[in-house]
Image (tube, grey):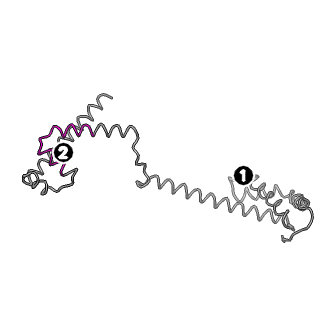
Amino acid sequence: MTAGHVPGDDRDEAGRAIVAALPRRETLIRFVVRSAPGIDAADVVQDAYLRLVAAARRIVVKDPTAFLFMTVRNLLKDRARSHARAVRSGRDAVQEVGTEEHACTTPTAEHALIARERLAIVERALAELAPNRRAALVLHRIDGLSHADIAVRLGLSVSMVEKHIRAALDHCHRRLFQADHETGARR
């Protein structure tokens, strides 16, 4: 195959190339079927013929059959690369979905409602606590104070602060547990 511009009617040259290569169509299809089972062979061969027509309008195609075989090989390579990229991309997408950094952080309406209900239960449980017990828990869990700082602020021993926090947490957990079982019994 050699390239060179031919003055005159490009359609004539393209037509001659097609006529010269048309008898090889079935051979090309068999070649594609053997080379890449599972690919639509007729589709690949048609793409090759379209490229032959486009090339014949620009250059002289001395050996249309050789041009078609080379084009078919290149099309098969392109499709194999595209398929490999798609497989890698799909595998990457599956891996990304499994990672926490790509997890959806927006709660559903149902989850938001459940969270609000549980918060209300904890607020009621806190209201049931003695003032020092409630203060110890809030200062530790909400304000982030250490047990020693809370002890100074409330005028209690560190040991008593630890007991208050533990008892307050137990109370809140009991209320949540009771609410969960009441809700489960209603379902």
Q: How crowded is mark 2: few (under 14 residues within 10 Å), some or many (20 or more)?
A: some
Q: What residue type is labelled 1?
A: Asp
Residue pushed farthest top?
186
In magenta stretch: residue 131: yes
Image location of residue 57, percent across then percent down: 85, 62
Kind of element beneath mark 2: helix
- Reading the image, the residue beneath label 2 is 169
Residue 124: in magenta span? yes
Q: Residue at x 91, y 67 (%)?
A: 7
Query: Which element is circle 1 on?
Result: loop
Among numbered discs 2 and 1, the one appearing first in the sequence: 1
**Residue drawn 16% across and 57% down?**
146
Q: Is residue 103 left or right of residue 93?
A: left
Q: Is residue 185 left or right of residue 139?
A: right
**Mark 2 or mark 1, whichever is nearer to me:** 2
Location of residue 185 with respect to 114 vertically, above or below? above
Magenta stretch secondary structure, dominant: helix
Quarter holding the N terminus is: bottom right
Circle 1 is placed at which residue position?
A: 40
Q: Which mark is residue 178?
A: none
At x 44%, y 53%, the residue is: 102
The residue under label 2 is which amino acid type?
Leu
Q: Is residue 109 left or right of residue 85?
A: left
- Give the quadrant of residue 183: top left
Q: Give coordinates of residue 24: x percent, y percent.
A: 84, 58
Quadrant, the C terminus: top left
Q: Where is residue 170 in the image (x, y as percent from the top left)?
A: 17, 43
Residues in magenta?
119-139
Find residue 80 and report its image quarter.
bottom right
- Give whichever of 102, 148 is nearer the camera: 148
